[in-house]
Amino acid sequence: MPYKRPAAERPPLDVLVAGAGYVGLAAAVSMKQARPNLAIAVVDAAPEGIWEKDGRASAIAAAACRMLSRLGCWEEIELQAQPINDMIVTDSRTSDPVRPVFLTFGGEAVTGEPFAHMVANKTLNGALRRRAAELGIDIIEGVAVRAFETGIANVLVHLADGISLEARLLVAADGVNSRLRDMAGIKTVKWEYGQSGIVCTVAHERPHNGRAEEHFLPAGPFAILPLMGNRSSIVWTERTEDAEKLVNGDELVFEIELEQRFGLKLGEIRVEDKPRAWPLGLTLARAFVKPRFALCGDAAHGIHPIAGQGLNLGFKDAAALAETVVEADRLGQDIGALDVLQRYERWRRFDTVQMGITTDVLNRLFSNDFAPLRTVRDIGLGLVDRMPMIKGFFIRQASGLSGAMPRLLRGEPI
């Protein structure tokens, strides 16, 4: 690791990113790789090394894989990534003896590459951290941002350890409950679904062959996502009250309920880690930028995991913000000026609002047991399955290969 100058000795920065998750790191690496002259640092409130204990996994869309490849991270990640070769969608009750498949997706996007890979969170985070170190980006861990003051030419950021850092731009990538967003006075549109997402990893006897499954059940979607080896990641939506009872109750009861939803197609299953549950809701920031301040990733938008697009929306934010900042710097413009940052906001705002509304509608449409509605949605799924053009549209959406894509997501340099 490179020598890290004590914070008290740090010269003024061009960009300070708050949040050392995947989105914050990707934004920092993207800007620094394209413009080595920019002085960039990352500050994170989480304890040092806590990211290595994250046992979860994420679905990385094809466009995000291209971005990670351009950033010099994908070659390392791919060795431990499981491609999703195909996907099936069913709509049933847990008590149904047969779960008919209404929709199938082949695993190749229009470009001939898998539309997604499953990657362990610590693998993804580790690769981005190593690339940041190679580029000379300092990561200050275990220190929160206490406050910040925006001036005409810079922003002064006060850390919890008493140190203050000066930058031309502060990027908030500190999650859906962003404290920096609140400090900036940015309001949100927000509501809770009364659901929680249960996440765990299971081992099974037979290979999954790279198949992902999503079962729409009355309480919410139950997703089985393939991991390396005979293992799968579970993202299981339940009513919050039931989810808390399941994860905090008897392990045998949890395993019985899990098996009822998972089925026996892959043989006997075994839970590998402690299941955890997170409350689900929709959060959309009313503004993405202020002078010398920009929201990125979940700090700007938190959506339902029904479409598996939350992380990939964050990567789009990182790529779009980096492209905006880099192009402004090349033109000699002030990278923290409001008119520059509003280009990023205009670029990303419609896409994130559209995805938020889409996931909200899908969740309300499928998370119920109203018989007439079930019939209509099952007919709709069946029609989509028989219409190649519409199915191709959904595959491109899942791959992240639609809309106004930043250059990095096309696999091009900024």
Image: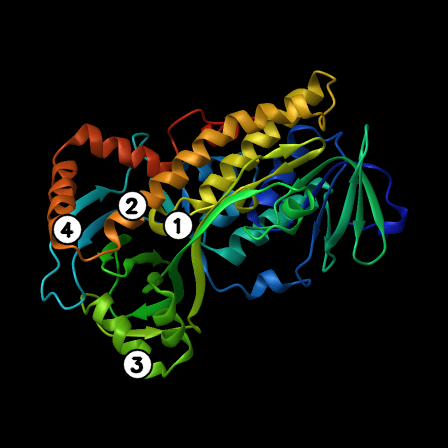
Looking at the image, tell me whether mark 4 or mark 1 is earlier in sequence order. 1
Kindly identify which numbered label has been placed on residue 362: 2
Disc 1 + disc 3, Cβ < 8 Å: no
The residue that disc 3 covers is 253
Q: Amino acid at mark 4?
A: Arg
Q: Which mark is residue 374?
A: 4
Helix, strand or loop for disc 3: helix
Residue at figure coordinates x 76%, y 29% from the top left: 37
Q: Position of residue 376 (x, y in %)?
A: 12, 44
**Mark count:** 4
SS state under label 2? helix
Using the numbered discs, state the Cα–Cα distance from disc 2 to disc 4 in whole angstroms. 12 Å
- Whether residues under marks 1 and 2 lie with C-beta atoms below 8 angstroms apart, the answer is yes
Q: Does label 3 or label 2 sit earlier along the sequence? A: 3
State which tag comes first along the sequence, 1 or 3: 3
Observer-nearest residue: 334 or 105?
Answer: 334
For the question of whether residue 69 can be seen, the reply is no
Q: Nearer the viewer, mark 4 or mark 3?
A: 4
Distance between mark 4 and mark 1 Cα atoms = 20 Å
**Mark closer to the chain start, 2 or 4:** 2
Q: Earlier in the sequence, mark 1 or mark 2?
A: 1
Determine whether the residue tagged by mark 4 lies in a helix, strand or loop.
helix
What residue is pinned by disc 1?
Answer: 304
Residue type at mark 1 is His
